[in-house]
Each structure stands twice: as C-alpha cells, then as structure tokens.
C-alpha cells in the first residue's frame, strides 16, 4: 500500500461552503468513496432498501427507511449491497457551532449527536410516513435555496427555522427510540457536550482530567460521573476512542503507521500499537493491510 505523507494526505470531505448543506441524491451506480470522518455533523435520511453501513466496528444492513446521525468522530461508510440498486437519500451537513446557536437552555439540538450511552445509538429505524415527513421538511429547505435570493428579507431566518424544526423532529425520534424521558437541560449537561467537542477538536493534544475540570469549571469526580452518563465511558476512555477512530481513518487512507501514531496524539509507537490492538483486535499494520482491498466503496 502506498504511504501518504503529511502534506499530501487528502481525506474524504464534503464541500461545505457555508454553515450547512442539504441535498437530495438519487443514484443507481457506485459513487467511489472511503471510510471517512467529517469535520461537520451529518444527518443521512435513507429512503431505499439494500444499503449497508460500516462503522469500523460493525456492519449494519439498513431497513428500508432509516436515519443515520454522524458527529465529527463517527467513522462510517455507506454502500450498496448489490450494483445498480437505487440509493435515494437526503444528506444534511452542518457545522455544530451553527446548530448550537439555534439551541436553547431547555432544548439542545445536538443532543442526538452527543448523548450516546446506547448500542447502535446513531441509527434510527423509521416507518414510511415518518420518513416521508422528514423528506418533505428537507424539500422545503432545498426549495428555498433554489428559488430565493440569498439577500431576500427573512430568507436566512426562514431557513434557520426549518432546520431547527427538522432537528427538533430528529431529536424527538431519537429520544423515543432510546426511551429518553428525563430532560437534559442543566448547565452541566451542556458543559459535557462542550467537553466532547473540545476532545473531538484536540484529541491529538495532551488532555488530562484535571485540565478538563479546570477549563470547564467542574468538579473532577462529578464531571466523570456525568460524562459516563452521557457517553457510556469515562473522559479518558472517550479520548482514546476518538484517537483510535481517527487512526483507523488515516490507516485506511494509506498513511504510514509511524505517522498515524504521532498524528493522533501518541508519542510512543509501542504504546499506540498496544492500545490499537486492544481496541480493534489486530495491530495497526494488520488493520491497514486487511482494509486495503475494501477501502473504496459506493457512497
């Protein structure tokens, strides 16, 4: 496998010129891609059967109507189970800071992307009527984008309201599927979401519990308890998970193991290899070699 240097590594990225992007895609042939992680958050509404989702940990055969939620540390790859199959989907990308600004103290629209103490948390099964209702909401956004001038009075606010309503619906579905009945409205919950975002951005840096507690004005032990309640793991376990998830992406893009080690915050190759094997089950090199023949799939 060819090795890719630091200056030439070009990961898969969706072009996002503004704060968000909404598109309706209908394809019948393979669109080549690779396992990838977005800087942006993604909501993928699938209206087709015969699709497969790989997350690096698990492979899912998706139901006919499904909704997938990816934050900026979710490694994923969507592919067709057989060629020449219809792939009808709506894809929404957005910068989390943009949506965070639409949230309130009582309603955090990023909750479904961050509150993940459940297995298979980011895959929602829909019925046909719910899927069509969500699609109609996104059609309204797309129509506004294509028929109104960007400078038209109120068009930006109308779009924000439509996006907020869409994500409110998504969060309600998320809460219903996972049986969430208690509100997550306290300041500390929102602070934990800020810590998650901080880890997502700074995973390659030295991060300690004491530093996080000081930076976000929380008691260290209370922070760990609340963090585990939201994510299902401790802050340091979450940091390791983020580092190794990013390592998988870089390895599948052909980057040398030694360079990946430094890129994801490890100073010692042996330590990195042990942590990777403990989490993934194989060494970084074996993982890279095993993924060589399957790096490119339809998207």
Image (tube, rainbow, N blue to C red):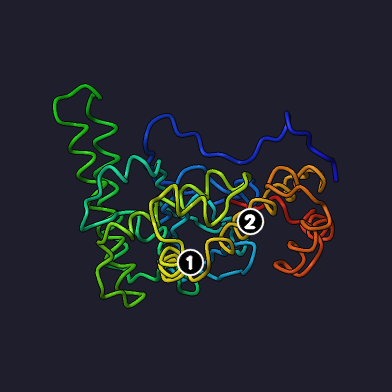
| Residue occupying the far left of the picture | 153
Q: Residues within 10 Å of mark 1 (few under 14, many from 20)?
A: some
Residue 66 visible to the viewer: no
Q: Residue at x 25, y 60 (%)?
A: 169
- SS state under label 2: helix
Q: Is residue 103 left or right of residue 48?
A: left
Q: Where is residue 246 drawn, in percent x and y?
A: 64, 51
| Residue occupying the far bottom of the picture | 179
Q: Is residue 137 left or right of residue 18?
A: left
Where on the picture, by quarter, is residue 53?
A: bottom right
Disc count in the image?
A: 2
| Residue occupying the far top of the picture | 151
Q: Residues within 10 Å of mark 2 (few under 14, many from 20)?
A: many
Q: Which residue is mark 1?
A: 49
Q: Residue at x 40, y 50 (%)?
A: 216
| The label number, if any, that marks residue 245 in the structure image | 2
- SS state under label 1: loop
């Amino acid at each position: 496998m060819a090795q890719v240097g630091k200056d030439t590594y070009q990961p898969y990225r969706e072009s996002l010129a503004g704060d968000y992007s909404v598109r309706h895609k209908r394809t019948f042939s393979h669109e080549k891609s690779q396992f990838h992680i977005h800087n942006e958050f993604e909501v993928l509404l699938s209206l087709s059967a015969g699709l497969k989702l790989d997350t690096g940990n698990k492979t899912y055969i998706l139901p006919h109507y499904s909704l997938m939620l990816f934050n900026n540390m979710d490694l994923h790859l969507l592919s067709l189970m057989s060629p020449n199959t219809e792939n009808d989907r709506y894809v929404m990308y957005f910068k989390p800071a943009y949506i965070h600004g639409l949230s309130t103290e009582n309603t955090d629209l990023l909750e479904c992307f961050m509150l993940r103490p459940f297995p298979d948390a980011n895959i929602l099964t829909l019925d046909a009527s719910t899927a069509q209702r969500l699609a109609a909401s996104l059609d309204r956004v797309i129509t506004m984008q294509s028929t109104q001038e960007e400078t038209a009075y109120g068009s930006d606010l109308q779009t924000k309201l439509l996006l907020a309503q869409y994500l409110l619906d998504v969060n309600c579905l998320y809460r219903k599927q996972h049986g969430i009945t208690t509100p997550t409205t306290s300041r500390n919950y929102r602070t934990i979401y800020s810590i998650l975002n901080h880890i997502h951005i700074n995973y390659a840096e030295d991060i300690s519990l004491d530093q996080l507690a000081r930076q976000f004005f929380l008691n260290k032990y209370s922070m760990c308890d609340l963090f585990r309640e939201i994510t299902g793991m401790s802050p340091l376990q979450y940091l390791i998970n983020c580092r190794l998830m990013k390592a998988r992406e870089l390895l599948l893009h052909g980057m040398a193991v030694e360079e990946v080690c430094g890129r994801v915050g490890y100073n010692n190759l042996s330590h990195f290899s042990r942590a990777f094997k403990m989490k993934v089950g194989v060494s970084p090199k074996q993982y890279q070699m095993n993924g060589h023949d399957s790096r490119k799939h339809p998207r």
